[in-house]
Image (cartoon, rainbow, N blue to C red):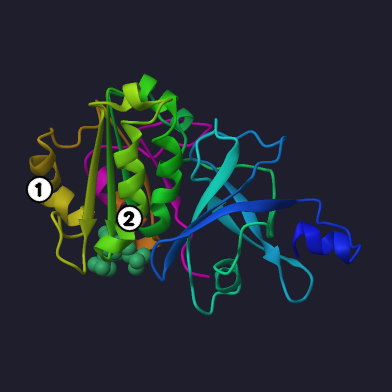
């Protein structure tokens, strides 16, 4: 129910309701949206919150969504998949400016700079909507203050699915707030697995073969200097975790920072 509808029907607006301010559809599987930010919400870039809609049974239908906007932004941004028969996303994909969504204001998560020990290079490896937390982190000045080089990889099925990450990362250098910090520090490496493009294949294979490092003209992964954040499907996380652990990386947490951290992206429903 929208704010206006609630007023007309004289019903209570949900205490956790926030209003949609912008919706962008990228493909028939992916869209992003922006909502008003509750004043009480403080979060660290990379964290997630529970968001959703009121279901047909009148109860909130909530899922974990990484906040895609940086912590300094006045609004909140989310990046979502559309699952045709998914209980939440089949409805969420129809939201319009002015509609309400439910947003619980308790941010959590391990994809935060605090869960990593200091290092020189920060790798952010993602597939699909797993790019969302990196949309937040790559817009956060703290990341550029703490690391000399940021390498963001995003693997999707086809080129259209890279639209969100491509526009966002390409726009960073001209961003009035962080443009100067980003210049020369951020490398974006998009790859596709089901359509021809400049860089092809799963990032896992491109790391194992060394191609990603060759393409970018950088050194191979090294736990002495590098920190890694990864966010994608369960299989992706499992495969990358193994690659990293084989190379001597250790998984970190808020309570015990280490050399890599991971989070499961919103996967299906
Ligand atoms: P692929 O096309 O070879 O399955 P999805 O849209 O299904 O979430 O997948 C997003 C991207 O993640 C796809 O390009 C997919 O490649 C890739 N992917 C899926 N599983 C893995 C994995 N275990 N390791 C690396 N990449 C993966």
Pick the residue in front: 29 or 216.
Answer: 29
Q: Which residue is mark 1?
A: 211
Q: Quick one: SS at disc 1?
A: helix
Say whether residue 266 is magenta: yes
Pick the residue in front: 22 or 185.
Answer: 22
Q: Quadrant of ligand 1?
A: bottom left
Residue pictured at 38% horizontal, 67% vertical: 27
264 up-or-down from 249: above or below? below
Residue pictured at 49% horizontal, 45% vertical: 68
Any mark on residue 163, and which?
Answer: 2
**Residue 197, picture quadrant:** bottom left
70 up-or-down from 48: above or below? above
Pick the residue in front: 255 or 105.
Answer: 105
Pick the residue in front: 236 or 102.
Answer: 102
- How many residues crowd mark 1 within 10 Å: few (<14), some (14–19), many (20+)? some
Is residue 44 left or right of 27 when viewed as pictured?
Answer: right
Q: Position of residue 7 (x, y in %)?
A: 86, 59
**Residue 107, picture quadrant:** top right
Residue pictured at 76% horizontal, 51% vertical: 16
Is residue 143 left or right of 47 when viewed as pictured?
Answer: left
Any mark on residue 146, and which?
Answer: none
Range shown magenta: 241-269
The prevailing secondary structure element of the residues shown in magenta is loop
Residue pictured at 53% horizontal, 45% vertical: 67
Q: CA distance from mark 2 to mark 1?
A: 23 Å
**Residue 91, picture quadrant:** bottom right
Question: Which of the image's four quarters has the N terminus?
Answer: bottom right
């Amino acid at each position: 129910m929208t704010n206006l509808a609630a007023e007309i029907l004289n019903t209570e607006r949900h205490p956790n309701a926030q209003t949609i301010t912008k919706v962008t559809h990228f493909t028939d599987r992916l869209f992003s949206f922006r909502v008003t930010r509750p004043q009480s919400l403080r979060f660290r870039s990379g964290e997630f919150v529970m968001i959703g809609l009121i279901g047909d049974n009148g109860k909130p239908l909530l899922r974990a969504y990484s906040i895609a906007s940086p912590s300094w932004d006045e609004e909140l941004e989310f990046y979502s998949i559309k699952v045709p028969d998914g209980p939440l996303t089949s409805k969420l994909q129809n939201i319009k400016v002015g509609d309400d969504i439910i947003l619980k204001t308790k941010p959590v998560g391990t994809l935060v700079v605090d869960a990593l020990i200091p290092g020189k290079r920060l790798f952010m490896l993602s597939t699909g909507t797993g790019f969302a937390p990196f949309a937040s982190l790559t817009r956060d000045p703290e990341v550029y203050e703490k690391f000399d080089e940021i390498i963001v990889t995003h693997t999707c099925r086809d080129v259209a699915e890279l639209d969100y990450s491509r526009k966002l990362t390409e726009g960073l250098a001209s961003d009035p707030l962080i443009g100067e910090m980003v210049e020369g520090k951020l490398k974006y490496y998009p790859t596709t697995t089901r359509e021809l493009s400049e860089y092809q294949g799963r990032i896992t294979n491109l790391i194992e073969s060394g191609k990603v490092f060759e393409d970018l003209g950088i050194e191979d992964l090294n736990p002495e200097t590098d920190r890694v954040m990864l966010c994608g499907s369960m299989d992706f996380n499992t495969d990358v975790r193994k690659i990293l652990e084989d190379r001597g990386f250790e998984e970190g947490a808020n309570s015990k920072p280490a050399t890599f951290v991971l989070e499961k992206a919103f996967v299906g429903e």
